Amino acid sequence: MSIKTIIAIIIAVLLTIVIMQNRDEVPFTILFTSMYASKLVVMASVAVAAFIVGVIIGRPKKQKYDIEQYHDTMYNKNKPDTLSDEDRDYIS
């Protein structure tokens, strides 16, 4: 297992322990509404939302495709003028 996997497992276990210790109902005020909800539900929903935001922000950016560089690398390989000076001296 990689270090990243081990850290993810440790964080998941600690998060589960903290969430399970806070199962009692408490009043929450969301915008202008006050309601009773379990701390477990609120903490779990915040953890899921944070995970989704982290995945969206942490994904790699798409690389831009540079057609000119691709063309140059494809067609400069077959250039007939690729001999070194030593090779030219040997041939002539």
Image (cartoon, helix red, strand yellow):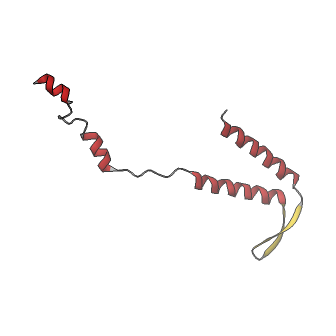
Q: Observer-nearest residue: 52 or 6?
A: 6
Q: Residue furthest right?
A: 24
Q: Residue, x 78% and y 57% (percent of image)?
A: 43
In this picture, residue 41 sits left or right of residue 69 = right
Quadrant of residue 47 within the rendered picture:
bottom right
Locate residue 45, reporting x and y percent.
74, 58
39 up-or-down from 92: above or below: below
Position above or below: 81 against 42: above
Which image quarter holds the C terminus? top left
Q: Residue 57 in the image: x percent, y percent?
A: 59, 56
Q: Residue placed at 31% from the left, 45% from the top?
A: 70
Instruction: Using residue 83 as the reference point, say whether residue 63 is left or right of it.
Output: right
* Residue found at x 87% / y 55%: 22
Task: Tell which residue pokes out farthest to the bottom in this image.
Answer: 32
Q: In the image, is 46 to the left or to the right of 76?
A: right
Q: Nearer the viewer, residue 72 or 32?
A: 72
In this view, the residue farthest toward the top is 90
How far from the left and from the top, in percent, is residue 51? 67, 53
Relative to 72, say whether 85 is above or below. Answer: above
Quadrant (top left, top right, bottom left, bottom right) of the N terminus:
top right
